[in-house]
Image (tube, grey):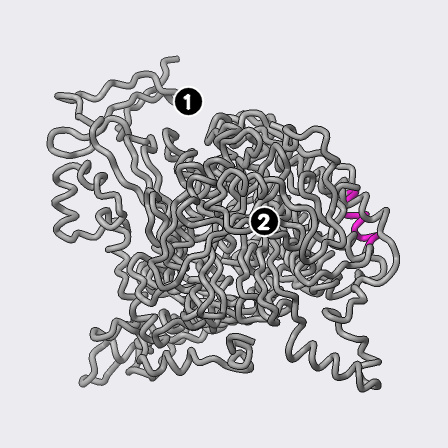
Amino acid sequence: MLPGSANPGAPAPATPRNLPQRGGEPNPSAAAIAAKFGKSFVRSEVIWGDTNVYIQASAVSEIIRWLHDDATQQYDYLSDVTAVEFRDAEQPLEVVWHLRSLPFRRFLRVKVSLDKRAPLAVDSVWPIYKSANWLERECFDMFGITFTGHPDLRRILMWESYREGYPLRKDFPLRGRFSRAEQLRQALSITTEGRYSMEELSVAQAFEDLPEDMRRRLAGGERTGE
Amino acid sequence: MGLSHTTPTSAMFGAPHQESWVTTKLDFLVNWSRAKSLWPMPFGTACCAIEFMATAATRFDLARFGMERMSFSPRQADVLICAGRVPFKLAPVLRRIWQQMPQPKWAISMGACASSGGMFDNYAVVQGIDTIIPVDVYVPGCPPRPEGLLYGIMMLQEKVMREKMSDNTIRNEMEPDPESGLYIPASRIDELSEPFGNSIQQTRSGL
Amino acid sequence: MATKTRTVEVALGTAGVDSDGRAVRTPMTVTENGSVTTLEPPALGAAPELAGEHMLINIGPQHPATHGVLRLVLELDGETVVRCIPHIGYLHCGFEKIGEYRQYNQVIPWTDREDYLNSIGNNVAFSIGAERLFGVEVPPRCTVLRVIAMELSRIISHLVWLGTTCIDLGAFTPFLWSFQERENVYNLLESWVGARLTTSATRVGGMAADIPEGWTDQLRHFIRTFPKTVDECDRMLTKNGIWIGRTTALGVMSANEAINYGLSGPMLRASGVAYDVRKDFPYLDYETYDFDVPVGSNGDVYDRFLVRVEELRQSTRILAQAIDRLPDGPVNSSDHRVILPPKSRAMSDMESMIHHFKQVMEGPRPPIGEVYVPVESPKGEKGYYFVSDGTAKPVRWRIRPPSYVNLSAISKMVEGHLLSDVIAINASIDIVMGEIDR
């Protein structure tokens, strides 16, 4: 597959120069979203040459599905899913999807504002893009945003029993909430047996598949995996 | 040997912290054979591991120091080279690997992050692996040049050469405090992990 | 002359256990020259029921073949992988959190240590992103120097990949060759920026240092000698029966799957998608260089190897063009918002001194806004996403890690393959844990 194939008449891509901070040519997909999903479309803007589209949180799945499937859009590549929390505590938290259309060589930033007073939840795009799997898990780990419909939403970078909170939130201190000694104590108290043994691997059904004697030994606390 | 009130062993090998001819010669032989053929266990996590690989590779040739036999299993290793930063999630793993190594064993902390947390003074990184395992040699640098690591290894060899059989404290395992599970007192850890230099100034939020 | 034979007992891995749970040992007759003449089948009562038993095996986090502190939990049926559960985060060091507490120029040392095989490339990527956020343009000499930096970085990163992958698959010699070449690149980098690995070579609006005198001649020498090493590795591996046998038809990703899983870089191109950020979303005037994007067709480990080896050659081509066009002039932008005044003026002129003081103590302030600038790192599409609220420190500094997304497809890639192939597939992703866990 050749990138740019859907738009053969377009000029060859070139290094952008002297981009304006605001304004500039918007991505046509922004207008298309506004026309098709008028109610869910909030606003769009062009910053440093990239188009931001703000949409309603309830329509994420629908709009991104359309962007992926529609022949005039073909956003087939999900670069990134992340979130932004601002220093101003009143400002809502934003979830950001960086979408890329390889056939059209387009880039679109889709954003959703989440009110921090309500539960932070938004639709998962995992059914559309498999690449969202770990990206959404990381977002959950670092910000505590729940992605509804994600098949396996659990912490990915911090350990499962991490108790200090969500590190990239602005109310989380740089050095963590606990003292260093307490952090180290908690980290060391993760028994490696526990983490290495088969029950812990969050593959419960695999444990069921194990032979009877092995399950008995494991249940009896025998050390494994050394 | 004519002293009847001592056991034969203590006469030959001397009382604790006393040296006899046999023990010094035996010490030399044992230490020499240990020091000149250390089997490193590379616990490489980050950037320092790349410099460690460079040390082992063509130009710097770690084999000149009797260390070309990398032991990726801790059970056949003599010296743990902790190359790279150690986050809290890795702390129990490092501790477990250290426990799996048989005595005699030594540890080299390679690089600023392993030695002190380095530039990662944040919620995720252990501020110095000496809060988890006993460290013999600290190699500074971010990452240390291969020459730096080689110098650290030579210092470790010197240290090994100075060991005495009569000193039975050097082989003691560091046991955790049963209450807290920590290896050194909590207050000491907090003291060691305090921010230093101007890093306090740099971490004011909101500027 | 009658051949002397002797009979040895071997424990066959496949023979299983007898009813008492002891490993079955099989008598095997061996001739003097070592060839096996008779091998009696093990006398087992009933064949053990092995089909239903799955085994869990844990690889890592400390394992020489996982290229860092990756942990894979594999569910095996016999020797076939039924399921793979990767566990990451053992090197999570909070880069993004630290970035929110540092001025833009102060973040650059962290970019070195994040994808530490590609330090100088990360420096360049960071600076390009930050410059777009500040609205700063850099002079042409700086642009060309950055191209040289990026391609040198690609070369040393691919060389680590080549060396370590060869070790994983049982070939030691290419490791020594590739590390020898890495030392040559390190020499170049060292004489340019003073560090081998953690370079911190760029600043927002320019470079930390111009290249020293005679540096281009050293680089030319490297460009002449380096392709010989690539050819040597190529000769040794590309037609090597063992290499081909251990890499073909492993971890196949079709083009559509690869795009849907968000793969990028050589992983994506090996699957037949010619997506290269340098061509499709150019930066640093890459559109003016003449180079090809190698594309595979099968999307297996062997194709990824071929793509990377060809990229080594293409990088050399770009380097040669970059030296030829290297213009004279300053390496730093003249934009006073981000660049310090010259030292001589800061020491004699009050305005410049105040300016210097403000720059150092408070840091340059970008306007409110956000940018995401992708570059083609050796692992794939790497992007730095900055959000600024007008203060001297970013509100959010996000790293789009290519090997993080590439690794997330490993569960799909290893399914149905043998345990020993997991190592090859894992190696083909070219992961670097510093970037994955950040």
User: Which of the two discs, 1 and 2, labels the residue nearer the N terminus?
Assistant: 1
What amino acid type is highlighted by mark number 1?
A: Asn
Q: Nearer the viewer, residue B155 or C207?
A: C207
Q: How many marks?
A: 2
Q: What chain does badge 2 belong to?
A: C
- Residue C193: quarter of image: bottom right
What amino acid type is highlighted by mark number 2?
A: Lys
Nearer to us: label 1 or label 2? 2
- For image coordinates 16% across by 48% down, the residue present is A218
Residue C239 locus on image (x, y percent): 60, 26
Q: What is the magenta range?
A: C216-224
Residue A169 locus on image (x, y percent): 42, 65
| Element assignment for label 1 | loop
Q: Is residue A145 above or below residue C40?
A: below
Same chain? Circles 1 and 2:
yes
Rendered-image quadrant of the N terminus of chain C:
top left
Task: Read off the residue under disc 2.
Answer: C382
| Element assignment for label 2 | strand
Task: Read off the residue under disc 1.
Answer: C33
Q: Nearer the viewer, residue C231 or C7?
A: C231
Tell whether label 2 touches label 1 (CB within 8 Å). no
Q: Main secondary structure of the magenta part?
A: helix
Q: What chain does badge 1 belong to?
A: C
- For image coordinates 60% across by 58% down, the residue present is C370
- For image coordinates 33% across by 67% down, the residue present is A164
Q: Residues within 10 Å of mark 1 (few under 14, many from 20)?
A: few
Please indicate, yes or no, whether residue C101 appears anywhere in the rendered image: yes
Q: Which mark is residue B134?
A: none
> From mark 1 to mark 2, how far is it between C-alphas?
57 Å
